[in-house]
Amino acid sequence: MRRRLFLLAAAGWLAGCATAPEPAKRRLTGADLFAVEPAVFRAAVLTDARVAVQAVVVDVRSPALDERFVLRLQQPAAVDRRLPTAPEGLAWRVLALSAEGTTTLVAVRQLLASRLPGPEGLEVTVSALPAMVPADLIAALPVRIEMLVDNREGWFTLGEGTLDLRP
């Protein structure tokens, strides 16, 4: 009996060693938005290869000022070689700030810096806006969102899962 328990424990340990490591997950913060170089700021969406992604939206809320700001990463960019290889049937859609988006980011930072003591307390949410989704994926669209705010830190995962796009 002890031997069986040991073998089961060893098999579980080996299975755990054989799986790929979880991607590093963290949140996009107000401090990130204050520090990011607009030319570096990127979002990468891993989804079904048939899906077109219109934009990644960064919603910034300041409860202290009772204000909301929206940043759109919608300029297609090259797939970064630091992103993991997309599994078969999936593709990375990398988006950057457009010239207008860069202007908006700089203006929002200047406004917030002039009215707040710092980025603490800012609420930041990120969402992907798919433009065209095949009918067979409407109920379960696979999505993973990665962000790049610092070339030294590299990409980090914001979230991963499936979206139900039914009304």
Image (tube, rainbow, N blue to C red):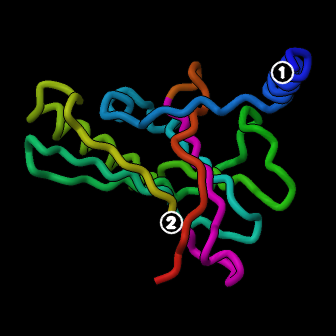
Query: Quadrant of the rendered structure where residue 25 is?
Result: top right
Q: Residues within 10 Å of mark 2 (few under 14, many from 20)?
A: some
Whether residues under marks 1 and 2 lie with C-beta atoms below 8 angstroms apart, the answer is no
Q: Residues within 10 Å of mark 1 (few under 14, many from 20)?
A: few
Q: Compared to 36, does 94 lie above or below?
A: below
User: Where is residue 114 shown, x and y percent of the image?
Assistant: 11, 33
Out of 151 and 166, give the one closest to the viewer: 166
Classify residue 146 as left or right of residue 27. Answer: right
- Residue 5's label in the rendered image is 1
Amino acid of disc 1? Leu
User: Where is residue 4 shown, x and y percent of the image?
Assistant: 90, 22
Amino acid of disc 2? Leu
In the image, which residues are magenta? 130-149
Classify residue 77 as left or right of residue 85. Answer: left
Out of 124 and 75, give the one closest to the viewer: 124
Residue drawn at x 81%, y 32% as measured from the top left: 19
Q: Is residue 143 magenta?
A: yes
Q: Compared to 133, does 150 lie above or below?
A: above
User: Where is residue 52 shown, x and y percent of the image?
Assistant: 65, 69
Query: Quadrant of the rendered structure where residue 154 is?
Result: top right
On-image quarter of the N terminus: top right
Residue drawn at x 51%, y 41% as measured from the top left: 158
Residue drawn at x 62%, y 57% as measured from the top left: 143
Out of 15 and 102, give the one closest to the viewer: 15
User: Where is residue 66 shown, x and y percent of the image?
Assistant: 9, 50
Q: Nearer the viewer, mark 1 or mark 2?
A: 1
Q: Which residue is mark 2?
A: 129
Real-space CA distance between mark 1 and mark 2, rounded to the nearest whole angstrom? 49 Å
- Residue 23's label in the rendered image is none
- Farthest front residue? 1
Q: Earlier in the sequence, mark 1 or mark 2?
A: 1
